[in-house]
Image (tube, helix red, strand yellow):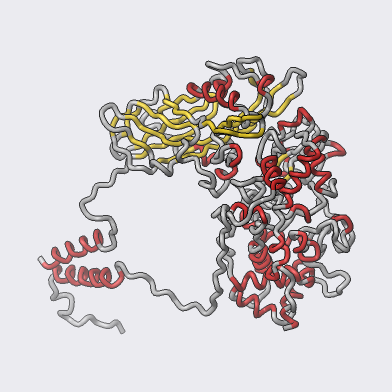
Amino acid sequence: MRSTIFFLLVTILFNTGCRKDPPGETVSTQKLILTFDFMIDGNPLQRDTLLYMNEAGNQYMVNEIQYFISDVVLHRPNGDPVLLDAWTAIHYIDSDLPDTRRWEVYDTIPAGSYDSVSFTFGINEAKNQSLMFLNPPESFMFWPEYLGGGYHYMKLNGKWLDTNSVVQPFDFHLGIGQIYAHYPDSIIGFVQNYFTVSLPNSAFSLPANGQQQITIVMNIENWFRNPNTFDFNHWGGDIMQNQEAMRLGCENGHDVFTSIVAKQGSIEQK
Amino acid sequence: MQQRIPSGSLKSTKPGAIISLIFSLLLGFVLLHGCKKEEPSTPEWHATPYEIDIPYGFPTNLNIPEDNPMTVEGVALGRYLFYDGRISGRSDPDSMMSCGTCHIQANSFECGINHPKYFGGFPFGVTGKPTPHVMLPLVNLVWNSSGYLWNGLVSNANSNPAYRNIEDLVWMGIVAEHEMDSDTNLSKQLIQNTSGYPELFYKAFGSETVTVKNMGRAIAQFIRTLISANSRFDKYLRGEVQLTPAEIQGFILFTTEEGADCFHCHGGDGNPLFTTHLFYNNGKDSLFTGPWEDPRDRYHITGDPMDLGAYKATTLRNIAVTGPYMHDGRFATLDEVIEFYSHHLVWSPYIDPLMHHIADNGVQLTPAEKEQLKAFIAALHDEEFLTNPDFGPPDKFPDEE
């Protein structure tokens, strides 16, 4: 009998002696993993080679892409949408930095079925504050105060073959636009160019204590078509101070992103 | 003789009682040790942590290796070593060389075109061999995580652990033919045999034995304290002063694509380091192979053809005193640099995509705009940094105390 009591005591001590978690609380462990990919014309992006033709007939290459998404919302069939970590979850993706292309969301997300995923391309006006990111690489995305401040939504850098058959650089940069009284001086207003992306075919199920991976794919060619045909020969290599060009690009952005929902049990490990 | 177990000691004990005894012992052990933290042993040696104050707008992440935490004693030792020519392993005044021989504080720890020995800002080693490239400044390097030297050879990405951080630049400088051209054994022996140094090494690292590794650690700690963050532009960002109209116009030119378009590589109000520390082919040349090949460009680190002719973007802080400019020092003055970016960019397949003004051979600044841009760049001059006595040569070396 005494041995049984001692056994129980020892067991209790081992199990509770140093535990910090409050007893009786169930911790949800289901996890959402967002990964990010780049494709052109249905194939994985091959950088640094003049392999592609846009709708305007420009032969072009992509050298690097950096962009932000924020306000990721998981929409439920019957229930409130889940906004991932309302203020802090602004995610930076960089084609040169593999770590940025995988986001293990640490929010507590209710298990269950979700209809779709949406997010803000870029950063909304309230959140897009200068010096919000002090550290690289995010800080290198700053959008000059004179041009509206905050951060680039995206830097898509590449080159195209111009009408003289010379390979010219382009910087397809999107962010806050400006309204000029006298271009390029005398700015009298700013335009918030961020927009909401609703990912098609992004319904998923998050099992209790399980995980779900969704790959967000940027289909790069769509930046340059539908509804607007974007011609580098017309717009040139830089558009940060050209709101009309940024407007066309952002309008094209509605179908740039697609998603791939991983089948349960086929989650890629880091 | 085998000792006998007294009869009746265990034999007569019931099995349940034995188990109880074992559990009692276990319980006692658990109660005594289960949650108890180890008592720290009192260290005999203790160095004083050195805290870096992060200036307004600067990154909060610091490039300080885990095995070389900053200490007051380490920084103090590093300052002595930085300026002591005996680190070259030589004691003859004619051939002694220190880091401070070339890295002049008044020139933002670069050579500068006004150097009394290295005419035009082109340094050479003790044997007269010229350095392959001109110098880079030692300023705000605690925020550089993208590699050191013009091509980023010294980087945490280097598979060779001897080429990882500022610490490693010290032994490299000692043995390089175009720098001290010495032997690290001679260096450490001379420092070891110089009175005062063993005691300083003990204070900094807990051992009086001088090692090349600890020499590198100390100098790296000192270099990490070389922070420039008090220029007129810093004060403007902090709301302490107003810039002149010319400086403001220059600032606008600096941070606009239709202006001088400097900010993507050289920072600005959102990146007060005034560099990304990254590598760019900025359109200086069109040929990079054969006789024009530079074995010290970024391509020779990454193997990526897009990095041919690419070099680190330097910080523009104190840039007026850090001539000559570009990796090969081809421009002696800031006027020449601005003229280059304005009208003389050279196209090549490897030019960085950020150089989108290449179609016009440059950003096409007017004479007035060039002056405004210069005015803004002059506002990045930090006289307090260039004259801070904490960063200058010590009044006496340890053996002179």
Residue B234 placement (x, y as % from top left): 63, 54
Quarter of the image with the C terminus of chain B is bottom right
**Above/below status of B262 relative to B389:** above
**Above/below status of B214 relative to A38:** below
Q: How many marks?
A: 0
B285 relative to A224 in the view: left or right:
right
B389 relative to B41 in the view: left or right:
right
Q: Is residue B398 visible?
A: yes
Q: Name the one closer to the observer, B235 or B39.
A: B235
Q: Which residue is at 72% across, 70% downward?
A: B81
**Above/below status of A120 relative to B82:** above
Residue B44 placement (x, y as % from top left): 52, 80
Residue B246 placement (x, y as % from top left): 72, 46
**Above/below status of B239 relative to A65:** below
Quarter of the image with the N terminus of chain B is bottom left
Q: Quadrant of residue B304?
A: top right
